[in-house]
Amino acid sequence: MADQTPRADLTKRQIPFMTLASGDTATLPGGPARTASASDTPESRFALPGTAVLTGGTGAIAHAVARAMLQHGLTGLMLLDLDVSSPAAETQIASLRTGFPATKILARSVDVTDEGAVKEAMEVAASELDGIDYLVCFAGVVGCHHALEMSASQFRKILDINTTGAFICAQAAARIFVKQNRGGRIVFTASISAHRVNFPQPQAGYNTSKGALLQLKSSLAAEWARYGITVNSVSPGYMDTVLNEGEGLREAREVWAGRNPAGRMGLPEELGGVVVMLCSRAGSYFNGSDLVVDGGGVVF
């Protein structure tokens, strides 16, 4: 058990205070805010003239978002995933490199729960890509276990990857953002599971990890605004990816679609525009926000 402060000493504590931003527009990511003018175009408003790191970067959703970000002007991209040398990962990486031959696209295997490995990966990205401007976190796991039968180790693993892993990556990127002194954007992938208990699957660990991620997002948004760093999240609904395929999930898929006003699951491509907006100049005043992208599922 960790040492505990004697109760008699509790009144002697001094807690640190966070510092809020000064309100100077120079701290905005991408530089001072621009007023509307004849030169202000839709393209410039949603342009991403910088470099990005995506964790869980070879998954289906990350691949779709990476493609959208590249289409909006990324000059460099680092994809981090547990194993970027797997056949499936190599196919995704090759697809992006073929589609965007003029853009430097790197990939590196990393465990997001390993502080040292994440720090090194971020430093490599900053060195190879001439800095980092955007971090989008997709790395995560799902666990469906009845709470009466779920072990503590299973519960901890889900939180360690989904919540602690997101913090480790955000902290490593933010330290680079601060050194660069040009702000930065961080986008977490939360879930509708952060807003409600999903049905019919039991997933106390997953729901908890995503709910905690929303509070982490808000906490970092408050602390890091002074550096021109915005921290937001996207909460997808059920997405139609390989993770939700298979005959064993047929009945569950019917329930998910049947309890959604849209009557269907989402497509990975439907998250791209939201992430682009949050990272672009159009999203400069979003901070501490969570955008639910679920076809209206959480209204029930």
Image: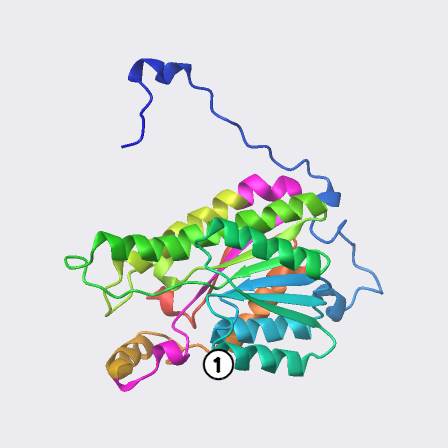
Q: Is residue 267 above or below residue 147?
A: below
**How many marks can you see?**
1
Q: What stretch of residues is rendered in magenta? A: 221-247
Residue 290 in the image: state x and y as whole percent.
Answer: 49, 56
**Closer to us: 228 or 177:** 177
Residue 39 in the image: state x and y as whole percent.
Answer: 84, 65
> Which colour assignment does the render follow?
rainbow
Q: Is residue 288 visible?
A: no
Q: Is residue 2 visible?
A: yes
Other-residue count near label 1 (Cα within 10 Å), few / some / many at <14 / 14–19 / ≥20? few
**Residue that sits furthest to the right in the current view:** 38
Residue drawn at x 72%, y 48% as measured from the top left:
182
Residue drawn at x 73%, y 64% as measured from the top left:
49
Q: Quadrant of the C terminus?
A: bottom left
Q: Quadrant of the N terminus?
A: top left
Q: Is residue 221 above or below residue 20?
A: below
Residue 23 in the image: state x and y as whole percent.
Answer: 69, 39
Q: Is residue 222 above or below residue 60?
A: above
Residue 238 drawn in magenta: yes
Residue drawn at x 43%, y 73% as measured from the top left:
295
In the structure shown, which secondary structural element does the residue marked by tag 1 occupy? Answer: helix
**Closer to us: 83 or 16:** 83
Q: Indicate left or right for 243 with 183 as reference.
A: left
**Residue that sits furthest to the bottom in the current view:** 247
Q: Which residue is mark 1?
A: 87
Residue 51 appears in which quarter of the rendering?
A: bottom right
Residue 194 drawn in magenta: no
Residue 275 in the image: state x and y as whole percent.
Answer: 57, 65
Q: Indicate left or right for 244 with 165 as reference.
A: left
Identity of the amino acid at label 1? Pro
